Amino acid sequence: MQGRVPLKEENVMEKWLIGLALLFALLGFLLFIIISIGVINVLQHNMDDSAGYLGNIGSFIGGVVGALWSLVSVLLFYVTLRLQQKEITLQRHELEMTRDEIRGQKEQMVLQNQTLVQQNFENTFFHLLKLHNNLVRALDLRDDQSRAVLADGRACFLMYYKRLETYVVLSSQKTGLAIDKADIDSTIGGYVQFFESNRNNLENYFRSLYQLFRFVDRSDVTISSSYAQFILAQLSSHELIILFYAGLNKTDGIKLKYYIEKFNLLQNLDTNLVFNQAHIQAYANQN
């Protein structure tokens, strides 16, 4: 806050009123001296009409000199009121400046707190994202007999998609339908079998992805959707199609489906990978 601004004797009117009061006071004092000299002179010469003369002098002093000094009092009182009013105005101005400064400090503290919250969120977010990516990189699919690595990392999801397709084909064959005509029940039946045969890897993957989106959703960061889109940008087409069928599965995918829809994770879904195009509408209609 800036230092206090002293009261200015700027006020031309106040200077003028003070000067006028001093002039009247001086005039009254001179008159009083002159009259006092006259009174002394009367008393020394014992004038016959001294009583009447002194009475007139007393009336003159009371009427003129008293009026002058009363006027001086009024002028000085008025100047005092003006100075007090300016002092009050100045104090009010200083109080407003203090309030503005406190308000500014409060806003600065809020911004600092928001920055701290943002930094803490980003530190935790990128740590969780790193853990999730490490989990994805650690994925590998091996030949059952030779144990040779068939795919690792995100490349595993291409093979997961092919395995899912196989299970859906087997499930839909029971109803005599080709895969592109597979109904929801047979498709979900195939997905459940696929998930159970790959549970060790997929369960951890889904749980990690769910926790990551859950953290973003529950954060105090106002642009949480931007961070969700950052996660989405790292997902492959085959990951998205697996997420699509996970969301279509009411038993296992319902929790993840909430975040799939909230953050519009399927906006980049390659619909050519969907086994039956009717599944897209079925997904949209599912509660």
Image (cartoon, grey):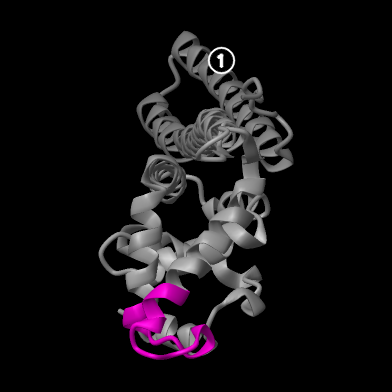
Left or right: 249 in relation to 2? left
Q: Nearer the viewer, residue 283 or 165?
A: 165
- Residue 90 inside the magenta-drawn segment: no
Q: Is residue 257 left or right of residue 139?
A: left
Q: Secondary structure at mark 1?
A: helix
Q: Residue at point 39% right, 76% down?
A: 187
Question: Which residues fall within the magenta stretch?
Answer: 169-186
> Can residue 76 be seen by looking at this rendering?
no
Residue 102 position within the rendered picture, expressed as x and y whole percent measured from the top left = 50, 31
Q: Which residue is mark 1?
A: 37
Q: Main secondary structure of the magenta part?
A: helix
Residue 9 % position (x, y): 70, 29
Residue 133: x and y in percent read: 59, 36
Identify the image quadrant of residue 123. Answer: top right
Q: Is residue 178 magenta?
A: yes
Q: Is residue 275 placed above or below 117 in the rendered structure?
A: below
